[in-house]
Image (cartoon, rainbow, N blue to C red):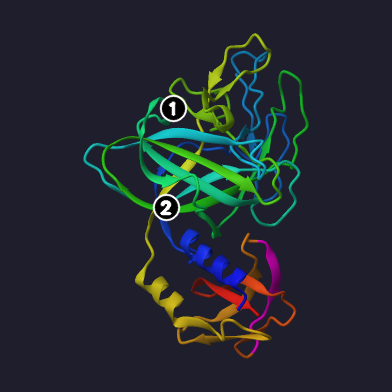
């Protein structure tokens, strides 16, 4: 096998845990959905809700103006932003964290999977802007979990009522992206720092915590780091009109713990693919009681390459280019992800 793919395979194993797992939510830093009806009366598409930039309904001349906040880097490093927000582990508690989830969008993106290919996360004890202590993570390792990321079923939209009415748009589909990082945290105040890279090397934006009628909570304290200048700034919405006061913002994220059951572990272990590397066919061995309904082949950025039916316990892969892929098997008892290499 080509050494190039051997190295990619080893890197993939180190940076991604692709087995789909069940998680329980430990913490939410705030919501983004504002309902299925915009303030101008527009109904969201079926199965979706809006995340509408809020206004201060007590003063109809004022509204927030920031739709999304930059939290991405490009390959040339000419643009490089990180976002940070805090969370508290309560007194007497201990959190065994397995992953974090974030919400982001790329304006005009029409793909069927999240538009990112890299997610980096750090956890600090104390404010990183004033010398907090790093306790987990780094800004090198890609912890993006392709298999457990997808649509948030929300569209981010500008304010539709004031100060200048705007049409409701569906050009900012919000994606929920997950990163796997395992750590245990005792009681205290921690800061989460994160950034992403777009698969097309373009911009990615993160909506702020959004509540209709509230332009920002007094305790909101999210920060943004401009890496090129090592400058931390408070995330605020300058608002409309320009004379309106600045409103501090929070960034929504979820903290989860693993609840992978014995049954799910057994399902993953009882289904295998051979040979691997493979040439024309992927043969599936299934010793479980699960029925495999369909299969999807994804590239390492999570882009869908092909959908297929499993016929006589095999899938045709002769038309795939040489390289490494993810084989996603959809069963009646859950989803199984396997790594395959096409020669």
* Residue 97 visible in the picture: no
Split into 4 quadrants, where in the image is the N terminus?
bottom right
* Disc 1: which residue: 129
Q: Where 341 falls versus 107 (above or below)?
A: below
Name the spot of residue 286 as percent of width and height, x first.
50, 85
The residue sitting at the bottom extreme is 312
- In the figure, is residue 37 to the left or right of 85? right
In the image, residue 32 above or below residue 142: above
The quarter holding residue 104 reads top right
> How many numbered circles does the render carry?
2
Residue 210 spot, x, y in % from top left: 56, 32
Tell me the mark number nearer the camera, choosing from 1 and 2.
1
Q: Earlier in the sequence, mark 1 or mark 2?
A: 1
Residue 283 image point, x, y percent: 59, 87
Q: Which quarter of the figure is the C terminus placed in?
A: bottom right
Name the foreground residue: 173 vs 99. Answer: 99
Which residue is found at the position 54% from the left and 49% from the top?
Answer: 119
Residue 89, percent across and down? 31, 39
Question: What's the magenta region?
Answer: 303-311
Q: Is residue 1 above or below residue 222?
A: below
Say which residue label 2 marks. Answer: 181
Could you tell me how far apart the alpha carbons at marks 1 and 2 are, in whole angstroms?
22 Å
* Residue at left offset 49%, top offset 74%: 333
Position of residue 163 relative to residue 180, above or below, is: above
């Amino acid at each position: 096998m080509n050494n190039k793919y051997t190295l990619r395979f080893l890197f993939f194993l180190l940076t991604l845990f692709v087995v789909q797992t069940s998680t329980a939510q430990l913490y939410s830093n705030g919501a983004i959905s504002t309902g299925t009806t915009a303030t101008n009366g527009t109904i969201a598409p079926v199965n979706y809700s809006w995340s509408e930039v809020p206004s201060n309904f007590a003063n109809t001349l004022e509204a927030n103006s920031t739709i999304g906040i930059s939290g991405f880097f490009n390959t040339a490093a000419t643009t490089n932003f990180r976002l940070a927000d805090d969370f508290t582990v309560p007194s007497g508690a201990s959190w065994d964290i397995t992953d974090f989830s974030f919400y982001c969008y790329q304006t005009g993106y029409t793909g069927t999977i999240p538009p990112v290919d890299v997610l980096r996360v750090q956890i600090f004890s104390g404010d990183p802007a004033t010398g907090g202590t790093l306790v987990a993570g780094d800004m090198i390792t890609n912890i993006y979990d392709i298999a457990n990321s997808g649509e948030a079923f929300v569209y981010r939209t500008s304010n539709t009522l004031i100060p200048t009415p705007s049409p409701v748009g569906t050009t900012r589909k919000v994606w929920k992206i997950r990163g796997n990082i395992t750590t245990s945290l005792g009681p205290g105040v921690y800061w989460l720092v994160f950034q992403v890279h777009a698969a097309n090397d373009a911009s990615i934006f993160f909506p702020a915590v959004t509540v209709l009628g509230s332009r920002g909570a007094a305790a909101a304290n999210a920060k943004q780091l401009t890496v090129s200048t090592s400058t931390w700034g408070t995330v605020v919405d300058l608002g409309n009109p320009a004379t309106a006061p600045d409103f501090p913002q929070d960034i929504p994220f979820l903290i989860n713990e693993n609840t992978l059951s014995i049954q799910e572990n057994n399902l993953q272990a009882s289904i295998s693919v051979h040979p691997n590397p493979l040439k024309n066919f992927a043969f599936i061995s299934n010793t479980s009681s699960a029925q495999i309904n369909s299969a999807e082949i994804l590239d390492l950025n999570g882009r869908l390459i092909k959908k297929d039916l499993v016929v006589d316990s095999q899938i045709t892969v002769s038309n795939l280019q040489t390289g490494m892929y993810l084989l996603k098997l959809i069963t009646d008892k859950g989803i199984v992800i396997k790594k395959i290499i096409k020669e």
